[in-house]
Image (spheres, helix red, strand yellow):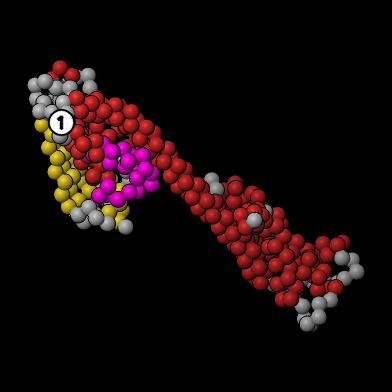
Amino acid sequence: MIHQLKNSLKRVLQNRRLHHLLFWGLSFYVLIHYFSYEEKLSKIDYVYTALFHISLVMGVYINLLFLIPGFLRREKYFLYMLCFVIVWIAVAYMNEFTFEYVSDFLAPNYFFISSYEIAELLKFSIVYLGLTTLLKLSESWFKVIETEKRLVEMKQKQSETELLALKSNIHPHFLFNNLNSLYALARKKSDETPGYILQLSDLMRYMIYESNDQHVDLEKEIAYITNYLELQKLRCKNKTRIRYLIEGELKHQKIAPFLMIPFIENSFKHGGLNQFDRDIIDLSIRIENGILEMDLCNSIPKQSSKEIDPIGGFGIENVKSRLESLYPNKHDLHLSKQEDEYKVALKLELNHE
């Protein structure tokens, strides 16, 4: 019910015809009391005020319908000001002309003379023309605000869609690979099996249930990354040297989920799981004064160095888009590829609780 009333009120307030009726109604009310010599309004007051409005109405709508769309909106400011001055002066003389000649045809039973000199009529004219220009500019400003609001909503929806797409991309292959590793441990009846199952459970719980908001606790995101790396150690065994260092204050910090993990996944996909000669993955995450810095480096297998592109891929492009949307002017990302290594450097201004 309240929502329907708000929509109805919004439609009424956005009705342009109503805006014009209210403007001229208010104008008529103010001027008739301004022109009247007595407290009680007489018929001649209504007629005089109506005649006085003829030139004002013409000037206002010439400004609204021709000058503003023809010159001001097209940024032809000099032409607009020139035409504005011409119309301003013309309105004043048109008012004088109305009472000297036109009134004899429109109100033959009344005798009028223009009560105001040109200098005074110019004041009336500039007030109405200037006011309508300001109102039109204000209307455009509100439209800009509404457009910006819609863009923000669209960006938020886009970011949510990208997050869902990224999560769906992470789930299948990661889960499948780690279940294979756990299966191998279980067959060996290793005492490490329950611990790894718990890590996988925590990781999946975070992916499915705890990472649905636009921003999550940094502690949980880092715990997710740590679980991921430990599970990857299980897969790589001793073939890949995996080193990671996390420093700084994690509490009371917020971050958009899954901004770092695609780069880490990429390092295993194109480095740590494909090499036979030199297997290195180094990760460093530092948090200081609300700034997160991640440096990631992985070696490249010589036999694949020309075929693999570290910049491409769905996950990386997705993260780039989300960074632009969620952290505009608050992040710095550098990706580089050399003959034998990939490097990722991400700097991010975190959100605080």
Q: In the image, 232: left or right of 315? A: left
Q: Quadrant of residue 263?
A: top left
Q: Residue at x 54, y 55 (%)?
A: 142
* Above or below: residue 27 compared with residue 347: below
Instruction: Pick whichever, 92 or 325, lies toward us.
Output: 325
Between 128 and 146, the one nearer to me in the picture:
146
Whole-percent x and y of residue 129? 62, 61
Residue type marked 1: Ser
Q: Secondary structure at mark 1?
A: loop
Q: In x, y percent, where is residue 25?
A: 73, 65
**Residue matched to label 1:** 190
Quadrant in which the C terminus appears: bottom left
Q: Is residue 209 visible?
A: yes
Label 1 neighbour load within 10 Å: few <14, some 14-19, many 20+: few
Q: Which residues are magenta?
A: 199-220
> In the rendered structure, does residue 125 fall within the stretch colored magenta?
no
